[in-house]
Image (cartoon, rainbow, N blue to C red):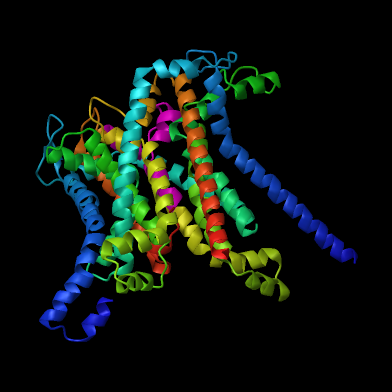
Amino acid sequence: MNHLTKVQRKRRALRVLGDVYAVLIYTVLYIPVAVMMIFSFNNQRYNYYWNGFTTQWYEKLFNNSAIIDSLWYSVIIAVLSTVISVVVGTLGALGLKRYEFRGKKLVNSMLYIPIIVPEIVLAVALLIIFMTFGFSLGMGSILIGHCTFCIPYAVVTIKGRISGDGNSLEEASMDLGANRMQTFFRVTLPSIMPGVMSAAFLAFTLSIDDVVMSNMLAGAKNSTLPVLILSMNKSGITPDVNALTTLMILAIVAAMLLSGGVKALLARRAKRLEAE
Amino acid sequence: MSGKTKAKRPGPGMRRRNLRRNTLPALAQAGPVSVWMIVFVTLPTLFIIYISFMSRGVFGDVVYEFSLESYQTLLDATYFKVILKSLRVAVFTTMACLVIGYPFAYYIARKPREQASRLIMLIMIPFWTNSLMRLNSWLLLFQTSGPVNNFLQWAGLTDSPITFIYTDGLVALGMVTNMLPFAVLPLYSTIEKLEKSLLEASSDLGASPAKTFMRITLPLTFPGIFSAIILTFIPALGIYTVSDILGGGKVLYIGNIIKNQFGQIRNWPLGAALSVLLLAITALLIFIYTRFAKLEDMEVV
C-alpha cells in the first residue's frame, strides 16, 4: 500500500516536472515573438531600449514606401511560387505515386536535395547557372529559386496524403463515362485536398520568409521584405518593421484559424448530409 | 499498372493503348517535376562542382582551367579555422537540440493524439514569424541597454552592462532556438510510433526505467534521432543569417564565407569549393542514414 503511493507520488512528480519543462521550452520559443510585438509599440526611432508606448509606427508604416514596396514584392513572389509549386507538386506527387517509370527513383532522391542540402549551396549554384547563361536577375530568378525548394516540400506533403490503395475510385469514375479531366477534378483532387492545402500553406510561408535564396538571386532594383530587413540590420531594424511583421504573423494565424474553422464546418455539414 | 501490360507481349494496338493509358498521363504528371529537378537542382549542383575545380581570374572572373587552387585555399589557416569553428557550432547546436528536444518530444508523444497535434502546432506558430525579426528580438533583449542587462544591474548581479551581443554565445542561443523544431518533429514521430507494450514488457521483466530507456526506447527511436541530427546539423552548418544578425559581422561561419565569395570578394571557385564541402558532408550523412532507414521515411515537413 505504502509502496503503491510511493510509485504514484513519483509518477505525479514526473508529470509535474514534464509540464514545467514543456512550459519552459514554449516560453523560450515564444519570447522572440513577444519581444518583436512589444517593441513595435516602442516610442523611439531605433529600438535601443524601451522608451514608452506609442502606436505611431502602425500609422507611419503605410507611408514608408520602401517597406510597403518590398512587402508587395514578397507577397507577389510568394503567391506565384505557391501556385506554381502546388500545381507542379500535386501532379508530381500523383505521378510519382501511381506510375512506374525509369528514373523514378532518381527523381525521388533529387527531391531531397533542396530539402536537406543547405540553402546557400543551392542559391549559389542557381546564381552561377543564371549568370553563366546570361539570365538576368530579378523577380524571375527569385521565383525559380523559391519554387525549387517549395516544389519538393509540396510533393512530399501531398504524397503523404495519397492513399496507397491504388486508383480504384478513378477507374470506377472513368468506367462510368467521366473523362480524364472530370475524373481529376471531381474524384482525385477532392480526395487529396487536405494535402494540397497544407502544401500551399507551407509553400507560402517558406517563400515569404525566405532570405538566403532571395538575397542571392535578387536583381539590383527590387528586394523582398526579408532581404530589406537583412540590409537594415547594420544600421538597426526600425520599429515600423516590427509593426509590419506583427501584422503579418497575426494575419497568418488568423488565416490558419479561419481555414481550420471552415474545415470543421465542412466536416460537420458532410456528416449531416450523410445522416440524411 | 504497367506491370499488367508488360506480362503479355504487347501488340501494336496494345502498345498504343498503353501509351494512352499509362505513358502519356505518367509523362504529364511526373514530367514537370522531373524536368524542374533536373534543370534547377541537378544541373546547377553538377555545375558548381565543376566550377570549384576552375581557377579565379585577376578581375574575379572564372578562368576555365583545371586547378585545385580553391581546395588548397580551404586548407589555409584562416579558412580552415572558420571551417572548424562552423563544425564546432553545428555539433554544439545539434547536441543541444537533441538533449533539449528528446525529453520534450517524449513529453508530447505521451499525450493523447488530439492534444499532441495541438502541442506540435504550438511549436510551429512562432516559426511563421519572420526569422530575422525573431533573431533581432534576441538582440533587443540582450543589448547593452536592453531588458536583460537592466535586470542584472537592478538585481545587483553586475555593476556595468555585460556585452552579450555579437558574441559566439548569443549566436549559439540563436542557433539552438532556430533549429529546435527540426529536431523535435522527427523525434516526436518516432517516439509516438513506439509500441507501449514493449516498454511494459521490459519493466515487467524487471528492467529499471533507465535500463528500459537505454535498451528499448533509445535503439528503437534511433532513426528519428538520426533524422534529427541531419535536419539540424546540416542547416546549422550552412546558415549565415544567425551569425549575420546576432554576430554583427564579427562572427563568420562557412555560410558567411560562401556568401561573401559571390558578393564583393568575387571568388566563385572558392565559394564553389566551400559549397562542395557542404555537399560532401551532406552526402556522407545521408549515405549513413540510408544504411538503416529509408529516405522517404524521414520526417522533413
Q: Quadrant of residue A141?
A: top left
Work out whether residue A235 or residue B49 is closer to the camera in this orientation and state it. A235
- Residue at 19% across, 40% down: A128
Quadrant for the N terminus of chain B in the image: bottom left
- Residue sitting at x 12%, y 34%: B57
The magenta segment: B231-260
The residue depicted at 39 percent of the width and 42 percent of the height is A204
Q: From this view, report whether residue B62 is shown above or below residue B50.
A: above
At a point 48% along the width and 13% down the height, the residue shown is A45
Left/right placement of residue B222 relative to residue B251 reads right
Q: Is residue B240 magenta?
A: yes
Q: Main secondary structure of the magenta part?
A: helix
Q: x, y (%) of residue A16?
A: 74, 50
**Residue B143 lies in the magenta stretch:** no
Q: Is residue A220 left or right of residue A157?
A: left
Q: Is residue B295 above or below residue B231?
A: below
Q: Position of residue A274 (x, y in %)?
A: 54, 64
Farthest bottom residue in view: B8
Image location (x, y in percent) of residue B117: 57, 53
For the residue pair A256 and B121, the one nearer the viewer reads as A256
